[in-house]
Structure formats: structure tokens, C-alpha cells
Image: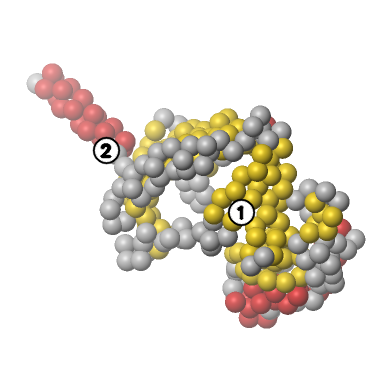
């Protein structure tokens, strides 16, 4: 009898352990990777599985059920902390990108692939967030860099051509040509608010007015805006990259539109038009909800 009871206990323990290690569906995601409730409107679904001291997080395309992401991580709520191998896949099932993370920091060599399976590029992440572009290949397999130097030209989703200048394996300049207008996204000397960052913070503190409705509702957060600074420092083409609420986003727009001309970005000593991303933080102090 004791032997039977012991055997039953071992079998139950094995079944319990196996259940713990199975994937558990934890979320549905929209195309912009926001959590949605239920499968309606979802583009992916996410599962989690215990693995050692961490987890294996997976995402699957809907409705095909094909894998989109396999990632080792330390945490997955409220934010994912990648730790270990991470692989991304195209919806066709071919590998898109793979690399290694250490406590949410990319480390070592990452490889990106075309959907046909050919290698697109190899990057190496070193300490201090240093990123080296080791190799870049065209879809037909031609290498674009020679000893870490060269110009990479790619067509982006908007149909524009993006050009990246690589020097000694490091990205030094990047620009797009749109309707004959060249706009830089990476430059040697970025555009700057007159007087620098300290002067810009003083301007924001004295100019931003917290919207009353947002204050009453306790809404806060950072609005990420994007805009062009032309060769004369004039701001144009202002858009929201990540908003908080309609009235807070509108206030961020108002404040940026009222800014004086900036010092333009410079490439090889010449003023150029550039794209700038600026976050503006709206935070309520204790007891300010009135």
C-alpha cells in the first residue's frame, strides 16, 4: 500500500511540474502592440512559460498561429525585461532577427535577415550602448560596406530612400530624400534650442499650462513629439509619436509651435534640415488635482 501511495505521489508531482512548464496565454495585442481585450481586433497573442529563474515569452500571429517572437526574459509585467536569446520571425515563418540580451541590454552580435532567408546585416552591441554595423547586404547578396565604411541605401515603408553613412563601423549620418528635400535623422551635431537644454527646460517650465480637464482627471505622462528643424532653425511638420490625451497632446503642440528658431543641425560644418524627437513630461504634483 505504501508503495502504491508513493508511486501515486510521484506521478502527481510529475504532472504538476509539467503543467507549470506549459505555455500560458496572457494577452492579446493589436498591430501597434497595445493590449486589447479578447481576440477581436488582435493581431497577435502572447504566452508565457516558466524556465529556470525566468520565463520564455512567445508571440503568435493571428489568425495563422505562426510564431512571431521567442524571447527569454526575467520579467514580463508590467514591462518585458529581456535576458537571453531573442528571435523575431516574419509572418511567413522565416527568421527575421536574432540576438542576445543581458538584463534588457542588447549585447554581442545581432543578425537580421531578409524574408527570403539571406542575411541583411550584422550589428555588434558593446558596453556603453556602443553599436557597430559590421556588415550590410543588398537583397541579392552584395555587401555595401568595405572595412566598416560605406553608404547604405534602403527603401522604407513610405517609399522614401533612407541613406546611412557608416564610418569605421559607426553610423555617423542618416538622411531621407522626400520630394527633393533632404531631411537628416542622424547627424554629427544635432539641432539645438537656443541656449541649449537648460534654456529649453526653463522655457517649458514657464510656458506649459496643464490642461484643466487632464488635471481634474489625474491624467499625466510624456508626449513624444517629432518635428523638422530647417536650415534656418524654423520648426515644421510637427507630429505626435506617442501621445497621452487629446488636450495634453494639443498643449505640447502649442508650446513647441511657439518656440523661437533653433540652431540647425550640422553635417561637415554645414547647416542641414533634420528631424528631432522631443518628449515633454506632464506630471501632477501631490495635491494638485483641483
- Secondary structure, mark 1, is strand
Residue 13 vs residue 249, the one in the foreground:
249
Q: Which residue is mark 1?
A: 162
Picture coordinates of residue 44, whole percent (x, y)? 37, 55
| Residue 132 placement, left or right of 199 | left
Q: Which residue is mark 2?
A: 19
- When the figure is inspected, residue 114 is found, relative to residue 278, above or below; the finding is above
Rendered residue at 72%/37% (across/down): 167
Question: Which of the two labelled residues, at mark 1 and mark 2, occupies the earlier sequence position?
Answer: 2
Tell me if residue 86 can be seen. Answer: no
Residue 98 vs residue 249, the one in the foreground:
98
Rendered residue at 31%/56% (across/down): 62
Decide: marks 1, 2 in contact (CB < 8 A)?
no
Locate the N terminus by quadrant.
Answer: top left
Rendered residue at 18%/28% (across/down): 11
Picture coordinates of residue 129, whole percent (x, y)? 67, 38
- When the figure is inspected, residue 201 is found, relative to residue 122, above or below; the finding is below
Place residue 247 in its image quadrant. Answer: bottom right
Rendered residue at 65%/57% (across/down): 176
Picture coordinates of residue 151, whole percent (x, y)? 65, 43
* Category of crowding for the residue at label 2, using alpha-carbon neighbours closer than 10 angstroms: few (below 14), some (14–19), many (at least 20): few
User: What is the C-alpha distance between the residues marked 1 and 2?
Assistant: 48 Å
| Residue 70 placement, left or right of 186 | left
| Residue 70 placement, left or right of 137 | left
- Secondary structure, mark 2, is helix
Residue 265 vs residue 20, the one in the foreground:
265
Picture coordinates of residue 259, whole percent (x, y)? 81, 72
Amino acid at each position: 500500500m505504501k508503495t502504491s501511495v508513493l508511486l501515486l505521489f510521484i506521478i502527481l508531482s510529475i504532472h504538476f511540474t509539467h503543467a507549470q512548464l506549459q505555455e500560458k496565454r496572457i494577452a492579446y495585442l493589436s498591430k501597434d502592440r497595445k493590449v486589447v481585450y479578447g481576440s477581436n481586433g488582435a493581431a497577435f497573442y502572447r504566452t508565457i512559460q516558466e524556465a529556470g529563474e525566468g520565463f520564455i515569452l512567445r508571440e503568435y500571429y493571428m489568425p495563422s498561429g505562426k510564431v512571431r517572437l521567442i524571447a527569454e526574459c526575467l520579467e514580463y509585467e508590467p514591462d518585458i525585461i529581456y535576458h537571453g536569446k531573442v528571435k523575431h520571425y516574419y509572418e511567413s515563418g522565416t527568421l527575421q532577427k536574432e540576438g542576445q540580451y543581458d538584463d534588457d541590454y542588447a549585447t554581442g552580435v545581432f543578425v537580421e535577415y531578409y524574408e527570403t532567408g539571406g542575411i541583411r546585416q550584422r550589428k555588434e552591441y558593446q558596453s556603453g550602448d556602443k553599436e557597430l554595423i559590421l556588415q550590410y547586404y543588398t537583397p541579392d547578396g552584395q555587401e555595401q560596406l568595405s572595412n566598416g565604411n560605406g553608404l547604405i541605401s534602403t527603401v522604407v515603408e513610405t517609399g522614401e530612400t533612407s541613406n546611412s553613412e557608416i564610418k569605421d563601423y559607426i553610423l555617423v549620418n542618416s538622411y531621407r530624400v522626400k520630394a527633393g528635400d533632404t531631411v537628416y535623422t542622424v547627424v554629427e551635431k544635432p539641432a539645438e534650442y537656443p541656449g541649449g537644454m537648460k534654456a529649453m527646460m526653463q522655457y517649458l517650465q514657464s510656458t506649459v499650462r496643464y490642461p484643466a480637464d487632464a488635471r481634474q482627471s489625474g491624467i499625466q505622462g510624456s508626449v513624444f513629439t517629432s518635428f523638422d528643424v530647417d536650415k534656418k532653425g524654423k520648426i515644421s511638420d510637427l507630429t505626435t509619436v506617442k501621445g497621452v490625451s487629446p488636450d495634453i497632446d494639443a498643449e505640447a503642440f502649442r508650446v513647441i509651435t511657439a518656440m523661437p528658431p533653433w540652431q540647425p543641425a550640422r553635417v561637415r560644418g554645414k547647416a542641414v534640415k533634420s528631424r528631432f524627437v522631443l518628449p515633454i513630461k506632464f506630471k501632477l504634483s501631490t495635491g494638485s488635482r483641483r
